[in-house]
Amino acid sequence: MTTTTTAVPVTTREEAPAVRRRRRGLAPGRRLPATRLIGPALLLALWAAASAAGQLDPGAIPAPWTVLRTAGHLWTAGTLPTDIATSVERAAYGFAIGLVAGVVLALASGLSRVGEALIDGTVNLNRAIPTLGLIPLFILWLGIGEAFKIAIIAIVVYIPIYLNTHAALSGIDSRFVELAEVQGLSRLRFVRQIVIPGALPGFFVGLRLGVTGSWLGLVVLEQINATSGLGYMMFQAQNYGQSDVILVGLLVYGVFGLVSDSAVRLIERRVLSWRRTLSS
């Protein structure tokens, strides 16, 4: 009887750094500082260069310095701070309601078959209906005041939070459930130790989409029977052909969207620091 032996390649101490370098080369590499600001800064530089070279019509797209000067005038006059405060308040109320609704519905649907039967189909039906198409109906129900604006923002926010959190709950490995049953975990400990950590990555994806959605919905809603807010300011500027004021509003929306998304990403990195992912 003959036995065959298979030679196992042995990595020497001298070859180990080369192997590590090859493995490390597959990853994106070390994170650059202020990465998310490079793209907007490049876009701003191109805008300034094109304006200085006379390639852009000042009536349609004013130069960056013109927009900054207009923003300074609006801030000094007191209209811009008031509009910003009103918009932030509306977005905050709608976002808070949508956040709570999305998380509660996702937990009820993801942890119970009865909840899934009652909730999941209804939410997906709501998702299939254009949210902005609900505006006339909500005006009839809630009037043309602040209530319908906050309600629409809440719907825009809760749908992505629900969908991503529910998908994360449904994707938890069943072996963890079996392990919890073997360990005799109570329902509360099971939710705290397995369900919540497993659902957090999906929840943060939905949270980022919800934060962005709250600002996108606000742009449209503030142009409907509003007397203040950034959307109202832009709508009035459209009537008077003030493209520089419109760009001021767009830039403020963009800055708020970028800052809020960056804040969520920062919280996500802190909360999920235990994960080893490609981005980290």
Image: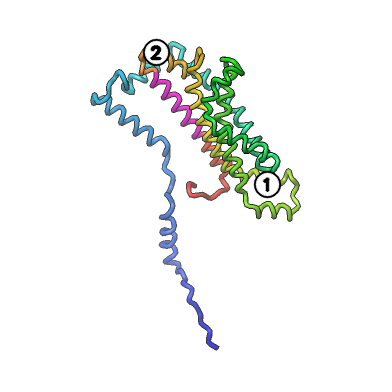
Which is the main secondary structure of the residues drawn in magenta?
A: helix
Q: Amino acid at mark 1?
A: Gln
Residue furthest left as drawn: 53
Residue at image coords 62%, 49%: 172
Which callout, 1 or 2, points to the residue nearer the camera?
A: 2
145 is higher (above) or lower (below) than 52: above
**Depth order, front residue of 255/224:** 224
**Which residue carries the number 1 mark?**
193
**Which residue carries the number 2 mark?**
239
Which label sits on residue 101? none
82 is higher (above) or lower (below) than 41: above
Q: Which residues lie in the magenta part?
A: 246-262
**Depth order, front residue of 85/203:** 203
Q: Amino acid at mark 2?
A: Asn
Give percent across and percent down for residue 83. Answer: 49, 16
Residue at image coords 46%, 19%: 231
162 is higher (above) or lower (below) than 230: below
Quarter occupied by residue 110: top right
Give percent across and percent down for residue 226. Answer: 51, 14
